[in-house]
Image: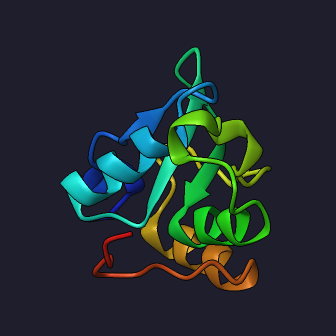
Amino acid sequence: MNFTTKDACNKAITVEPTSKLSDARDIMIRHNISRIIVAANNNPIGMVTEKAIASYLFKNSNEPLDKIVISKTMRTPIFTVDVDSSINKCAKMMIENNILVQENSKSL
């Protein structure tokens, strides 16, 4: 049996690029995750991570989270695969692109 991404995938937690960082932070804490897919019209366009939020806040410490839109901190482009891609192919792509996955998230 060939194990594919469809077999391993959960419904992605997404936010709109116009959402606020405070919304992203709340979702990350609620779901114990460290990154969220940014989607427009149900199409992934970027990703926001705890690290990106911290980096942005370090450089722009006067802005409150509820005033900063996610599009200012999201990382683009993102890598996507077809739902029928093998897990081996996905793992190889992640290694080649230095994509690390954390098992447990730390709260912001």
Q: Which quarter of the picture shows residue 31?
A: bottom left
Residue most extreme to the front? 62
Instruction: Residue 89 in the image: state x and y as whole percent.
Output: 57, 70
Identify the residue at horizontal 58%, vertical 14% (top origin).
41
Image position of 77 (left or right of 50):
right
Q: Is residue 47 above or below residue 38?
A: below
Is 83 placed left or right of 69 in the picture? left
- What residue is rendered at 51% in x and 67% in y? 50
Q: Nearer the viewer, residue 95 or 29?
A: 29
Place of residue 107 in the rendered image (x, y in percent of width and height, measured from the top left): 31, 72
* Color style of the picture: rainbow
Which corner quadrant of the image does residue 96 belong to? Answer: bottom right
Rendered location of residue 25, percent (x, y) = 40, 52
Q: Name the image quarter holding the N terminus.
A: bottom left
Using the image as rendered, state which of residue 88 and residue 64 is in the foreground.
Answer: 64
Residue furthest to the left in view is 30
Image coordinates of residue 29 in percent, x first then y, are 26, 59
Q: Nearer the viewer, residue 94 or 26?
A: 26
Q: Which residue is drawn at 64% across and 39% down?
A: 68
